[in-house]
Amino acid sequence: MTDHQMHRTPQVGKRRIAAAGCALIGLLTLASSAFGLASFQTPGGAAYCGWSEGEPPEALICWTPNDGYTIGMFDWGRPTRGTYERNNRGYEEPYAPMLRFGRTIRWGVTRCASRSTGLTCTNGDGHGWWLGRYHGLKRF
């Protein structure tokens, strides 16, 4: 981690989530302003996830800092295809709470489970994704 990354302020995190949230919402052709901070990270900082904030609908947004892959979904329906976001490559929020292996976190009908093999997030329709620890992706 560089000195620049260590001294980032929460505002930078808000802007990055805002950009990812806007991209997600744009992909789904819904107009909204979204921003927020990472709600959690997986062990080793392999993935970070957070809820967009702002006008509804809210969305779960996750990214992998090793390559900047960013994906999101609403409470219902299929997740976005995901994109490689240059701004999320190498971006970490070291103070985000840790979702340890074997633990699950829930927000309403959406949940994410952390395993040593990767992170699985699902919504109320049973759609979601599996992000491998440092490579691999399955959307369902």
Image (cartoon, rainbow, N blue to C red):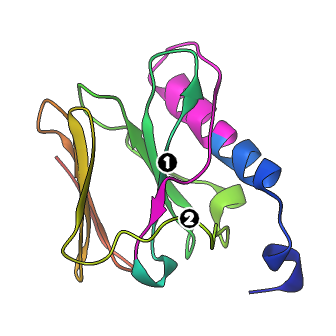
Q: Which mark is residue 123?
A: none
Residue 92, given in percent of the width and then of the height, sits at: 64, 70
Residue 96: give its label: 2
Q: In terms of image quadrants, where is residue 58?
A: top left
Q: Is residue 44 above or below residue 123?
A: below
Q: Is residue 1 left or right of residue 32?
A: right
- Front tag of 1 and 2: 2
| Circle count | 2
Secondary structure of the residue carrying tag 2 is loop
- Is 140 on the left-hand or right-hand side of 80? left
At x 43%, y 48%, the residue is: 71
Q: Is residue 91 magenta?
A: no
Check disc 1 and report the residue beneath it.
50
Asked whether the beta carbons under mark 1 and mark 2 sit within 8 Å of each other, the answer is: yes
Residue at 23% of width from left, 26% of height from top?
Answer: 77
Quadrant for the N terminus, please.
bottom right
The three-letter amino acid code for the residue at tag 2 is: Ala
Pick whichever, 70 or 61, lies toward us: 61
Q: Is residue 33 above or below residue 102?
A: above
Residue 48 shows in this picture: no
Other residues around mark 1 within 10 Å, as few (<14) / some (14–19) / many (≥20): many
**138 or 5: nearer the viewer:** 5
Bounds of the magenta span?
18-42
Three-letter code for the amino acid on which mark 1 is drawn: Gly
Mark 1 vs mark 2: which is more N-terminal?
Answer: 1
From this view, report whether residue 115 is shown above or below residue 88: below
Relative height, residue 108 to residue 104 (above, below): above
Separation of marks 1 and 2 at Cα, in angstroms: 10 Å
